Image (tube, grey):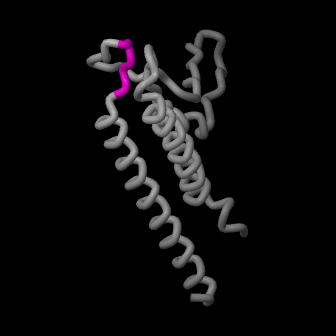
Amino acid sequence: MDAASTDIFGLAQSKLTWLQDRQGVLARNIANADTPNYQPRDEQPFSATLSAMTVAPVLTNPMDIAGSEPTAGTILEQSDSRAPDGNAVSVEKEMTLVADTDNQQRLVTNLYGKYMSMFETALGKG
């Protein structure tokens, strides 16, 4: 059995990919902090990515109500204030989001390492 195919490893990989994408979006926001009329963006919440990974229910009866799937990608952030040039980026807020994303990356990487260590111990390699 391949350790990468285990659900926890797939989930960790998905989270790390999402966090990497989010860091890129936040970096673009900070880079455009002086761009007139720039609206900051953020990634869809990871829960939307997570729900896309789950198995969707199958309609077994024509009377059932069909669900909808969330759309992935970036979304515009709602901002409370704008600069006189129309820019809505708050560098302080973006830096807080970058730090939070960094902490989440560290947590997921540590959990991934712990699970790999557990597998190695179970296989007699650790």
88 part of magenta stretch = yes
Q: Residue at x 44, y 14 (%)?
A: 37
Q: Give the quarter of the figure containing the C terminus.
A: bottom right
Residue 84 image point, x, y percent: 31, 12
Q: Residue at x 43, y 60 (%)?
A: 106
Q: Which residues are magenta?
A: 85-89
19 horizontally vs 78: left or right: right
Q: Where, by quadrant of the figure, is residue 103 drawn?
A: bottom left
Q: Residue at x 72, y 69 (%)?
A: 1
Q: Residue at x 65, y 26 (%)?
A: 58
46 horizontally vs 82: left or right: right
| Extreme residue in the top direction | 63
Residue 92 image point, x, y percent: 29, 37
Between 35 and 103, the residue placed more toward the observer is 35
Tell me if residue 33 comes above or below residue 99 in the rendering: above
Residue 49 image point, x, y percent: 55, 37
Picture mark count: 0
Tell me if residue 34 comes above or below residue 64 in the rendering: below
Tell me if residue 21 comes above or below residue 11 in the rendering: above
- Main secondary structure found in the magenta portion: loop
Between 4 and 103, the residue placed more toward the observer is 103
26 part of magenta stretch = no
Residue 51 image point, x, y percent: 53, 35
Between 80 and 67, the residue placed more toward the observer is 80
Between 116 and 98, the residue placed more toward the observer is 98
